[in-house]
Structure formats: C-alpha cells, structure tokens
Image: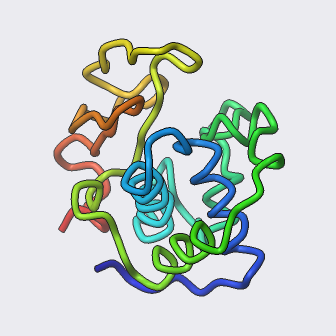
Amino acid sequence: MGRRINHTENDVNSLARLMLAEAIGEGAEGMDMVGTVVANRVEADCEPDFRNLRNIRHAIYHEIPGTGIPHFEPVLNGALYTQRPTEEDLQRARNILNGHRNPRARMNLWFFNPSPGQAFRDPCTPTMPRSPMTQFDFAHRNHCFYVGVPGYCPEFYR
C-alpha cells in the first residue's frame, strides 16, 4: 500500500485515461503498473524530477526538467484525450489514488515503451532514455520499468 492521494473525479478520469493510453494492450496488470508509477511520482517529491508534484494531474502533465517535453507520450501525442474509460477502468484508477500499488511496480518511478507500434518490444536499455539517474528493474509486455540509482530520492527509497 502507498499513501492515499487527494483527488477529484476529474483526477480519477485523467489517471484512467493515461493508464488506458499507455497500457490498454497490457491488461489490468499493465494498467495497474502504469498507474502505480504515476502515483509513486506524487509520493516521491524529490529533485530534480518530481519535486512539488502535489496531485495526480501535476504528475500526468509534468515535463522532463529543462526540456519542455511531457514525461508521458499520450500527453505529447494526444492519445490521452481520445480514451473513454469504463467504470472498471475508473475503479482501477480510484484504487490507485486510494493507496493501492501494484506490488511489482511499487518502487518504480519510470517506465517507457522502447518500440511503440511494433509487434514485439525492443530490448530494455540499462538506463531510462533522458533519465541517467535510473536503472532497469523489469519488463512487462511492451514496457520497461526503472528505479532510481542508489542514493537517488532518499525521500522515496527508504
């Protein structure tokens, strides 16, 4: 369990849409992992990547420091805005916001799909692109998941 994140129904809807846009083909577990990473970023509150992300919408629309590029591809390419979550999708997002975390992704702050649009995932890289303070943790279907290097974000990795 993680901490509960204060939220509105708009936050629930935004998180459900992001989870769908990122991982709809990866089943409930993949969507749970994506939601867990987003919630972890709100919990982490560490420099330089995640300082002052006070709510889920901040985390969803947050940009990679110094680049002006959103962290999440669906924000950049607009796929976030085309999703229509079902009640099951909304409940999955509510669960995340109420403190549920996928156990496998509980310590992850990053993920990415190294081969969007391809039938098979390219190999995961040792570090997350554009995030040198990361190290590969595990892969789930199309996504690679990353944790911080030792010493990164002691506020989160206690």
- List x then y, in percent, for residue 118: 52, 13
* Quadrant in which the N terminus is drawn: bottom left
The colour mode here is rainbow
Is residue 43 placed above or below 132 in the rendered structure?
Answer: below
Is residue 5 placed above or below 22 in the rendered structure?
Answer: below
How many marks overall? 0
Q: Residue at x 65, y 84 (%)?
A: 7
- List x then y, in percent, for residue 29: 37, 55
Q: Residue at x 28, y 49 (%)?
A: 152
Quadrant in which residue 40 is drawn: bottom left
Between residue 45 and residue 58, name the one nearer to us.
58
* Quadrant in which the C terminus is drawn: bottom left
Q: Residue at x 41, y 29 (%)?
A: 142
Q: Residue at x 40, y 15 (%)?
A: 120
Horizontal side of 123 relative to 75 (left or right) equals left
- List x then y, in percent, for residue 78: 81, 38
Between residue 71 and residue 78, name the one nearer to us.
78
Horizontal side of 139 relative to 67 (left or right) equals left
- List x then y, in percent, for residue 17: 69, 56
Is residue 33 placed above or below 1 in the rendered structure?
Answer: above
Quadrant in which residue 103 is drawn: bottom left
Between residue 116 and residue 43, name the one nearer to us.
116
